[in-house]
Image (cartoon, grey):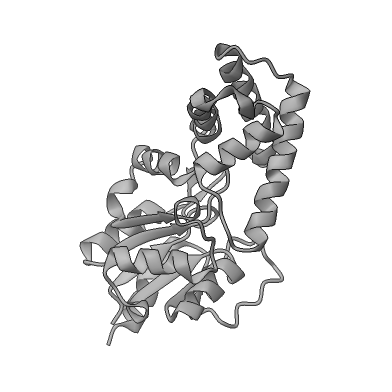
Amino acid sequence: MIEGVTFDWWHTIAETPWLDWDDRMKVLRIETIQKALEEQGVVVSREGLARAYERHTDLLVSSWKKLVDLAAEDQVKAFLGFAGVDGYGDGLLVPVQEAFGRALETALPVLYPHLAQTVAHLRREGYRIGIVSNTGRTWGRYLRPIQDEMGIGKYFDARVFSDEVRARKPDRRIFTQALDRLHLKPEEVVHIGDDVDADVAGAKDMGMRAVWFNTGFWPEARIDRADAEIHDHKEFPGILERWRP
């Protein structure tokens, strides 16, 4: 008996507002970090911060390949070290963290069609609902208020983010955190996501059911492990109905 549903966040619940989102975020973050440092009396060139940003990217990618994530504070400390300003004390941590985390507020993500209606329906039907998301430089503590502002935060009983768990999908630890917070067993939960490795395989390896949200971005994806495939969230309630005993 299915009692709960968990969703991936990026490319499943919401999409980035720009095609060149990574590049724009990089420019915005560097500009904001430079101003934040100057307010603390620390001067670093734009070029120096750009080099630090690239080294920071390499660090994250290296960690992610091991399915390990870094906490927000650890990410900021690493960046300050790459920028050569880690000797100025902890006073730089908060303003630089804010510059990283709040950049997304300049252009909120866009919800996929029928997502809000679908989670509202699931709530009315009594399902427990969660988010299980890998993060980048916009950490869980910043995504939660953004989701609340978008009007969907109220529907989720648990929101689990990789920077807080220190593990990334498909690692079992992040799914286990979500299941524990939902107070459900793996066989009682369906996970929906766009990534056939992180979401579909990760959920199936936990003993959960998995629905592939096909955005069209992965035309060569193998979905043999998915229990179902959807292209629009409005299709999902019908699949749940078929799974009811």
Q: Which residue corresponds to the image point at 58% horizontal and 65% vertical from the top-left?
A: 195
Q: Is residue 30 visible?
A: yes
Q: Is residue 216 left or right of residue 230?
A: right
The residue at 50%/79% (across/down) is 205
**Numbered disc total:** 0
Q: Is residue 216 above or below residue 89?
A: below
Choose between 90 and 102: the one closer to the eye: 90
Residue 17 in sight here: no
**In the image, is residue 38 above or below residue 168?**
above
107 vs 182, nearest the viewer: 182
Q: Would residue 208 be found to the left or right of residue 64 on screen?
A: left
Percent across and percent down for residue 46 are: 73, 21
Q: Which residue is nearer to you in this view: 21 or 70?
A: 70
Position in image of residue 204 (x %, y %): 49, 79
In the displayed structure, 235 sits above or below 44; it is: below
Q: Nearer the viewer, residue 103 or 116?
A: 103
Q: Is residue 65 left or right of residue 230?
A: right
Q: Classify the position of the N terminus by image quarter.
A: bottom left
Q: Quadrant of residue 147?
A: top left
At x 53%, y 64%, the residue is 169
* Position in image of residue 126 (x %, y %): 21, 66
Seen at 41% across and 42% down, the residue is 141
Q: Can you tell which quarter of the image residue 51 is in?
A: top right
Where does the image place residue 15, in percent across and percent down from the top left? Answer: 54, 48
* Quarter of the C terminus within the rendering: bottom left
Which residue is outermost to the bottom?
245
